[in-house]
Image: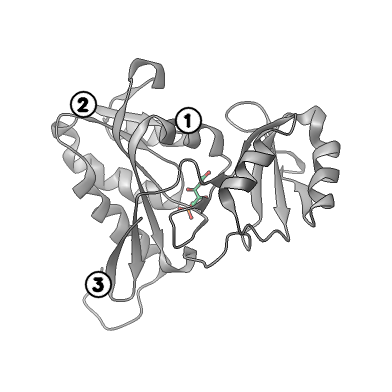
Amino acid sequence: MAQSHATPSQDELKTLVGRAALQYVLPGEIVGVGTGSTVNKFIDALAAMKGQIKGAVSSSLASTERLLALGIPVFDTNEVAELSVYIDGADEIDGQGNMIKGGGAALTREKIVAAQSRQFVCIVDQSKLVQTLGKFPLPVEIIPMAARRLMRQFAAMGGQAQLRLRDGQPLLTDNGQNILDVRGLQISDPLAFESLVSQWPGVVTVGVFAFQRAQVCLLGTANGVRTLTF
Ligand code: 5RP
């Protein structure tokens, strides 16, 4: 970050936490890598350590492409039984390490890689820390034929669900499915919410990460990186 007393930009805070996450990467190991603009900063920083690690398991085609372009080997999830650490961003995180994720549409693969990791280290700028999850529209990856019924189910619990579009067409995830973004929810019991919505037919993955919550959050603030542990 520039040596000045100016308030750091969001981009500078992302760079700060992306670099700080390197301390959780163990030499000789394979690291779990998430998706998004904050993780991109982490991947760029990881390039300096590439000779010291075996490689990475990635949670999206976009992250895989970036890792490979920097010369970091990428392993298939099925080749690796367990990862010591998974580094990823979030759209919101609460004081217990529960998160909303999926703003980048990678939530399904993110949850899979998080589930095979012993520790989730979340890297975010301070704007993402919230009391209660739900201000950020909740991403839900769904099977397209269930879209209308799932929209009605969210409406019944007070949410307004919208199909995410890209270039005027329903967005297709890396898994060939669609995303609903649900506004107007207050997720006061993330575990119960995740359990419930995960069982609705047609839901591939709900973007509440309570079962796969973070154990550590590196929070980028105007005064530097704050480490929260849960
Ligand atoms: C992608 C995600 C990202 O972690 C989340 O959207 C945060 O992204 P960014 O670091 O760009 O703010 O869940 O599916």
Total marks in image: 3
Q: CA distance from mark 1 to mark 3?
A: 37 Å
What residue is shown with label 1?
A: 112
Residue 93 vertical position relative to residue 193 in the rendered view, above or below: below
The mark closer to the camera, 2 or 3, is 2
Q: Residue at x 67, y 61 (%)?
A: 186
> For the residue labelled by badge 3, is the local secondary structure a helix, a strand or a loop?
loop
Give residue 35's position: percent from left, percent from top: 45, 42
Q: Position of residue 9 (x, y in %)?
A: 39, 71
Q: Which one is in front in this view, the residue at disc 1 or the one at disc 3?
A: 1
The image quadrant where one finds the N terminus is: bottom left
- Residue 62 is marked as none
Q: CA distance from mark 1 to mark 2?
A: 20 Å
* Residue drawn at 65 percent across, 36 percent down: 198
- Earlier residue among tags 1 and 2: 2
Q: Quadrant of residue 19?
A: bottom left
Q: Earlier in the sequence, mark 2 or mark 3?
A: 3
Residue 56, quarter of the rendered image: top left
The residue that label 3 is drawn on is 2
CA distance separating discs 2 and 3: 32 Å
**Within-10-Å neighbours for mark 3: few <14, some 14–19, many 20+:** few
Reading the image, the residue beneath label 2 is 54
